Image: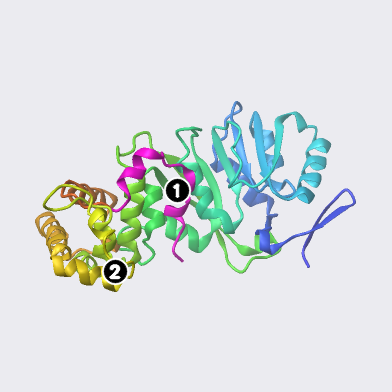
Amino acid sequence: MATASYAGKSVRLLKSRGQHLLTNSRVLDSIVRNSNINSDDTVLEIGPGTGNLTLKLLQAAKKVVAVEIDNRMVDILRQRVADSGLQDRLNIVCGDALKIQFPQFNLVVANIPYGISSPLIAKLVYGVEANPFRSATLLLQKEFAKRLMSEPGDSEFNRLAVNVKLVADVEFVMDVSKRDFNPCPKVDSTVVKLYPKAEIPDINFPEWWAFTRTCFSKKNKTLGAMFKKKRKLMELMRFSTDVHHGVSMDKQCDTYSSSDEDICKEASKAGDVYIFRDRIMRVLKTSGFMDKRPSKLSKDELLHLLSALNKAGVYFHDQPKLKEKPWDWEDAYEACDALF
């Protein structure tokens, strides 16, 4: 059983909460150095644990906001910082990093629990408009980092990478051995750095997220084969405009039976599903995407394809709801949650 102790206090480290404390001082110093902290920065640290990284951040930054869900850790963290005389620079927020609203910060440096890597990154990069920050230096599970840094054509290329890189640049910093942690995790880690982009595409984000979800559900299939499936066609017809009348096709579909088989049967009788399929096929052919696979398409190519489909009246998200409710980071969490 792994524990962490300080000044007579001892806590059991829970793997279920991703409590693997980085103990190698050389690695900790390297993370701080690569974070390029200025003396007037306010640094957000998520999952500080007992404060191994926190103490080094406090020496470099004006302020550190440490978000920790475990009260046992908070007690030790508070004591260690007080003993160092740096308590005036520390703001401890005890709560769930995925649920709370962060205080203002302009830099992120964190050894985050592996279990919340995907939603936390989504919250940070898609929440940058509400809380701008210069960069986020994050210690991640190595395999997760590889997926995040993957490029079109890589076997690891996935929806997470596409959605994150739409709004941020990702940079490799260094690998970290599993032996540098207490308790020792099963896998090595990697430090990456995220830089929010100064300019992002002017797109409808929920529509983009739904589109990438569709494409990467079968990322190695050709787009032509993917969009010939009746089940997928009927799903998209609910969001799209009627080829003849320019009205939402879900008004027609709502008159059909709830069972997919019956819906397809009824739609096929009317010929709508075939008309809709032909419309998508024309877009794929004229845009040169018929034989392309999502796993090999760049962000710009995917944006071009979505624009072409939307112009043809093909949508991937319920359009009326887009006007009723603005998107928030929880939508981004669902979109960016890696499909491991």
Relative to 23, does residue 40 appear above or below in the rendering? above
First to last magenta residue range: 316-340
Residue 147, image quadrant = bottom left
Question: Which residue in the rendered view is the most extreme toward the top?
Answer: 40
161 left or right of 108? left
Tell me the SS state at disc 2: loop
Where is residue 14 shown, x and y percent of the image? 72, 61
The quadrant of the picture occupied by the N terminus is: bottom right
Residue 333: image location, x then y, percent: 48, 51
The residue singled out by tag 2 in the image is 220
Name above or below for residue 100 compared with residue 267: above
Q: Give the mark nearer the N terminus: 1 vs 2.
A: 2
Disc 1 designates what residue?
A: 331
Task: Report the side of 52 relative to 340 (left or right).
Answer: right
Q: Nearer the viewer, residue 167 or 51?
A: 167
As shown in the figure, which amino acid type bears the numbered disc 2?
Answer: Asn
